[in-house]
Amino acid sequence: MEEDGSALEPCSYAYAVVLKSCIIGGEPYMGKAVHCHSLKRGKRLDLFCRNILLDLYVKLGLLVCANMLFEEMPDRNMVSFVSLIQGHMKCGNYADASKLFFGLYREGHELNHFVFTTALKLFALMDLPEFGQCLHASIYEALLLFSEMMQSGFLPNNYTLSSLLKASVSLSSLKLGKSIHGCAIKCFYESDDYVGGALLDMYAKCGDIEDARLVFDKVSDCGVILWSFMIARYAQSDRNSEALDLFQRMTKSSIVPNEYSFSSILQACANINNLSLGEQVHGHVIKLGLESEIFVANALMDVYAKCCDLDALTKIFSMLCLKNDVSWNTMIVGHVQSGFAEYALQLFRQIAFLI
């Protein structure tokens, strides 16, 4: 459109509106066109518009374009960094995301609750062997940041606290976990399902199953998640009678067990080679229609394999539409332990054929 021989120039607000529309409509090419239009006009987008464009590239999976835009930005703020960090996290580029976080931290940008929770999610995702000491260094940085923010009046939410508890597990630090527990009590989150589960997990994995049980008993209205957590920790610690007692209490209450509850209690049955109890639990599983759930089916197979009930083992295995490595391994080991090595070898050959 022309007026008095000159083109009307769109303002920053107009660019922002169009770019946001591109995000909502999933239009990456239109977003690129808007970007090119601004460059051709010699109009440099302001920081607000550049952040919207960066968000567009990230949300539509154009990470190369997002990286190029980020590097070309003359000035960046916290929003710029977090958008690109989330883009790299979404694509599994955790090392690059970590570098960006430390860049944000070193440059002294605003560090608010949103930044902190994004960082904690990143460090939880980085909990992989190949990161080694880098992971621990990242967690210490996050904890330092948390300490600074607490001193400035920051109040953590349940997600933040549970992420910190996961960090203490990664560091195998019971002392740190207890400190976070104290913070949860002060913030009235101790009875929260999400935080309660993380507390149970932290105490159990740090070898303090008694305190894990104390946390469980303090929660006034435990949901299926906390019941399942506690049963699982008992079974994993080979405290099978306590796992069985707790499961019995659970079934007598109004809580309906889920697939995680059943797989955990079946582990306890397998630990003590108790076929009768395993069959009773199997009955509950059938009533709730969970027999075909892979985790439950594998746990049932483990019970029958260890109790040498090959008919029941084979029946469940045959029923599974999708079998994973655990299913095949349990089937093979069960037959080897019962003296059917030749059939176990046939099963192994079937796996090789499928691969």
Image (cartoon, rainbow, N blue to C red):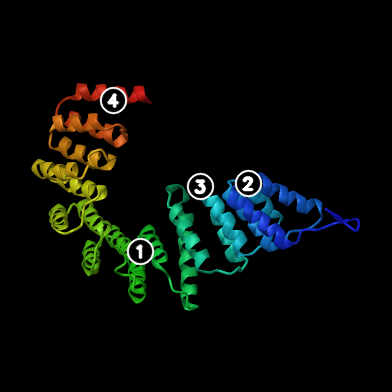
Locate residue 315: give its quadrant: top left
Q: Give the mark toward the camera: 4 or 3.
A: 3
Looking at the image, which residue sits at the far right? Answer: 5
Kindly identify which numbered label has been placed on residue 27.
Answer: 2
Mark 1 — residue?
A: 173
Expressed as whole percent of the image width and height from the top left, the position of residue 188 reads 34, 74
Crowding at dot 3, Cα within 10 Å, few <14 / some 14-19 / many 20+, comes out as some
Mark 2 touches mark 3? (CB < 8 Å)? no
Q: CA distance from mark 4 to mark 3?
A: 33 Å
Crowding at dot 2, Cα within 10 Å, few <14 / some 14-19 / many 20+, comes out as some
* Amino acid at pointer 1: Ser
* Amino acid at pointer 3: Gly
Identify the residue at horizontal 24%, vertical 50% (top origin).
258
Number of labelled discs?
A: 4
Q: CA distance from mark 2 to mark 4?
A: 50 Å
Q: CA distance from mark 4 to mark 1?
A: 42 Å
Kindly identify which numbered label has been placed on residue 348.
Answer: 4
Kindly identify which numbered label has been placed on residue 198.
Answer: none
Q: CA distance from mark 1 to mark 2?
A: 47 Å
Kindly identify which numbered label has been placed on residue 92.
Answer: 3
Locate residue 304: give its quadrant: top left
Q: Give the mark toward the camera: 4 or 1.
A: 4
For residue 2, side relative to residue 258 (left or right): right
SS type, badge 3: loop
Mark 1 touches mark 3? (CB < 8 Å)? no
Q: Which mark sits nearer the N-terminus, 4 or 1? A: 1
Q: Which mark sits nearer the N-terminus, 4 or 3? A: 3
